[in-house]
Image (cartoon, grey):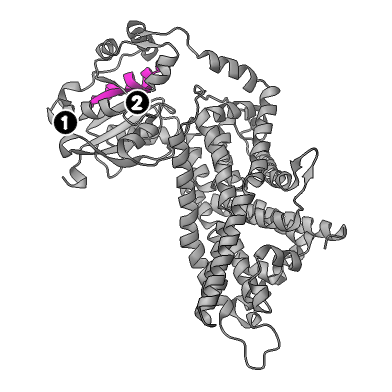
């Protein structure tokens, strides 16, 4: 059967119902799974293998509370279900995924979907959690009251979708789809949902005792904020405290590999490309992978546990004062990984003003691509010592850089709010999911995917930029009567010296100026670019073999390092981020505004930092 003729199954349901976890289980995909609203902001497709060799195309749709869309993600889900999605046929079967612990909310969408008149069944997910809470569901009675097939699933168990696959196979094999077309939905969805629950569900209490106990502390206006601050602080401390041994091992491996290549090859352009370009450049970036993964393990745990919506609730008042809303917190936190998915996650923000403001300040969040730059400069210029009773000084500086980005985002959004006519406050409507222990499989998948994304960038964009930069730094060769180092006569050397006229007031030398150019493709290229520049500009082979960190310590002042750190808090040096802003806003004007204001902030803040540092004797 061809791809175009595969039976199509669409997974639809409320946000946080477990659709994506079920999709991963059915298709073997590795889509991101998290315990908060808005993870799936686009429709995704995979393949499910049933019995007797039958295959299906499975769609994972964004979460929706209603078929009357209040956000872009709900509009996507509605259009796919109705068969109005551009260039795509209507699904042959709708599988509405509902949370067995929260049927009071989730059944309303089931009842509304009945009005579409399409074949559908209900996947009663998270049955294990419902059982632990003492919730008893009469599946037969629930199916009878809804007039639809109901199947139990547990998306976090390896065989948790077996019954669903068997049911789907039977429906398609026996031609039963036409017999399960839904009937028109009742006028009062709330009343009907209560009637169905009363007839089929025995629920000891509406919320779990452990949720209530934790929320008394974690949602407290004082203790809750203190807890959030401590969690974020510990996260950045761990980035340095736990990663050092792994980073040392990677550095040693890189140095060993460079020595092997140097001993095995004769001197010449190819050896220079391998050692000074590829090994020095890529090794200088890969060394920071442990720090990135440690940061992500914390973020994944917070996502999976159900804590993130609580943090959004706690911060709603503060963010509202700055022109955002608590719903902006999750896209902004996602931007710590990468601004691109963070900007896309703003589709779950219903208010257009809040969504645009969140998009424009998302690049100020410190994405993982900046972490290698921060780690290099902090390691070179901030001493590794304990302060204030055992806290890691380097971790404190990293925490301060992240807080500077967050504070700047709040300030920029506040200014935007003052300039716009609409200064009203918009109420936050957010579902708080039950707490749950993160599942090890989802954590492993999340870390694996993040590592692969990083390594693919190293092997793709960063490798290409490193080789290109090596070429620009190596050619043309110096003339016979040269009086300066050969690198000064290269294409890149000439470009870098020309750029110093603009960036000298910031304390940037020509080596930094060169590194800023390829960094527009990916910020972490700065590290590999600097490694290549300094390797090729070394006076002798011994100097060229040194790690980048001591070379930077020797060549830069503290004022220059601080200026470059501040530059990367604001600089719009990521073309993919700007392209995503254009796609999500549909406006070149907003994209140009983001580019200009970020560059102006970066230049102004770096200028002030450098000049003040020089005046204080750090130049």
N-terminal of the pair, mark 1 or mark 2, is 2
What whole-number distance in Å separates the C-alpha atoms at marks 1 and 2?
19 Å
User: How many C-alpha atoms fall within 10 Å of the one at disc 2: few (<14), some, or many (≥20)?
Assistant: many
Location of residue 48 by image quarter? top left
Q: Position of residue 68 (x, y in %)?
A: 39, 27
The one nearer the camera, 435 or 574, is: 435
Part of the protein shown in magenta: 97-125
Residue occupying the point 31% across, 14% down: 186
**Furthest-right residue in view?**
616
User: How many C-alpha atoms fall within 10 Å of the one at disc 1: few (<14), some, or many (≥20)?
Assistant: some
Residue occupying the point 65% across, 30% down: 228
Residue position for label 2: 97
| Image: 203 above or below 455 | above
- With 205 as the anchor, is 59 left or right in this view? left
Q: Quadrant of the C terminus?
A: bottom right
Q: Position of residue 514 (x, y in %)?
A: 62, 69
The one nearer the camera, 381 or 218, is: 381
**Furthest-left residue in view?**
174
Residue occupying the point 76% across, 39% down: 390
| Image: 450 above or below 564 | above
| Image: 322 above or below 572 | above
Residue occupying the point 36% across, 22% down: 109
Whether residue 523 appears in this view of the structure is no
Tell me the SS state at disc 1.
helix
Disc sitting over residue 172 in the figure: 1
Q: Is residue 111 magenta?
A: yes
């Amino acid at each position: 059967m061809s791809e175009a003729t595969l039976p199509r199954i669409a997974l639809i349901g409320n946000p946080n119902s477990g659709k994506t976890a079920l999709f991963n289980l059915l298709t073997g995909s590795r889509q991101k799974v998290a315990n908060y609203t808005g993870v799936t902001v686009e429709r995704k497709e995979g393949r499910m293998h049933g019995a007797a060799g039958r295959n299906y195309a499975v769609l994972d749709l964004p979460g929706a509370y209603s078929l009357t869309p209040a956000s872009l993600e709900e509009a996507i889900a509605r259009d796919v279900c109705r068969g109005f999605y551009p260039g795509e046929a209507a699904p042959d079967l709708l599988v509405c995924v509902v949370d067995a612990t929260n049927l009071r909310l989730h059944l309303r969408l089931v009842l509304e979907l009945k009005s579409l008149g399409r074949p559908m069944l209900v996947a009663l997910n998270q049955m294990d959690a419902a059982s632990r809470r003492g919730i008893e569901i009469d599946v037969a009675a629930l199916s009878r009251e809804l007039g639809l097939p109901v199947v139990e699933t547990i998306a976090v168990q390896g065989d948790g979708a077996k019954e669903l696959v068997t049911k789907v196979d039977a429906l398609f094999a026996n031609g039963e789809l036409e017999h399960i077309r839904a009937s028109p939905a009742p006028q009062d969805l709330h009343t009907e949902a209560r009637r169905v629950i009363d007839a089929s569900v025995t629920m000891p209490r509406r919320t779990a005792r452990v949720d209530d106990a934790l929320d008394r502390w974690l949602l407290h206006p004082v203790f809750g904020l203190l807890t959030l601050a401590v969690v974020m602080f510990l996260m950045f401390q761990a980035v340095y405290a736990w990663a050092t041994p792994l980073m040392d091992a990677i550095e040693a491996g890189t140095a060993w590999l460079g020595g092997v290549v140097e001993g095995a090859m004769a001197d010449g352009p190819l050896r220079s490309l391998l050692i000074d370009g590829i090994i020095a450049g890529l090794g200088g970036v890969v060394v920071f992978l442990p720090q990135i993964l440690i940061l992500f393990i914390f973020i994944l745990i917070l996502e999976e546990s159900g804590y993130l919506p609580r943090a959004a609730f706690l911060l709603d008042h503060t963010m509202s004062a700055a022109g955002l809303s608590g719903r902006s917190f999750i896209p902004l936190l996602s931007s710590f990984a990468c601004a691109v998915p963070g900007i896309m996650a703003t589709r779950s923000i219903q208010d257009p003003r809040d969504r645009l403001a969140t998009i424009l300040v998302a690049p100020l969040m410190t994405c993982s691509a900046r972490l290698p730059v921060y780690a290099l400069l902090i390691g070179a210029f901030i001493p590794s010592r304990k302060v204030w009773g055992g806290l890691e000084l380097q971790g404190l500086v990293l925490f301060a850089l992240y807080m500077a980005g967050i504070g700047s985002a709040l300030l920029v959004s506040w200014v935007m709010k003052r300039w716009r006519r609409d200064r009203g406050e918009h109420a936050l409507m957010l579902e708080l999911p039950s707490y749950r222990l993160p599942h090890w499989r989802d954590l492993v998948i999340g870390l694996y995917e993040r590592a692969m994304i990083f390594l693919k960038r190293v092997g793709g964009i960063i490798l290409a930029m490193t080789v290109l930069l090596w070429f620009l730094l190596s050619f043309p060769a110096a003339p016979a009567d040269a009086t300066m180092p050969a690198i000064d006569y290269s294409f890149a050397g000439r470009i870098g010296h020309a750029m110093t006229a603009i960036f000298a007031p910031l304390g940037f030398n020509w080596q930094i100026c060169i590194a800023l150019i390829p960094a527009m493709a990916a910020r972490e290229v700065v590290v590999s670019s600097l490694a290549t520049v300094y390797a090729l500009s070394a006076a002798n082979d011994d100097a060229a073999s040194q790690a980048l960190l001591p070379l930077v310590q020797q060549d830069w002042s503290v004022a220059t390092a601080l200026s470059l750190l501040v530059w990367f808090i604001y600089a719009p040096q990521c073309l993919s981020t700007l392209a995503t802003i254009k796609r999500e806003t549909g406006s070149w004007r907003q994209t140009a505004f983001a580019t200009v204001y970020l560059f102006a902030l970066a230049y102004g803040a770096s200028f002030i930092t450098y000049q003040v540092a020089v005046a204080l004797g750090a130049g």
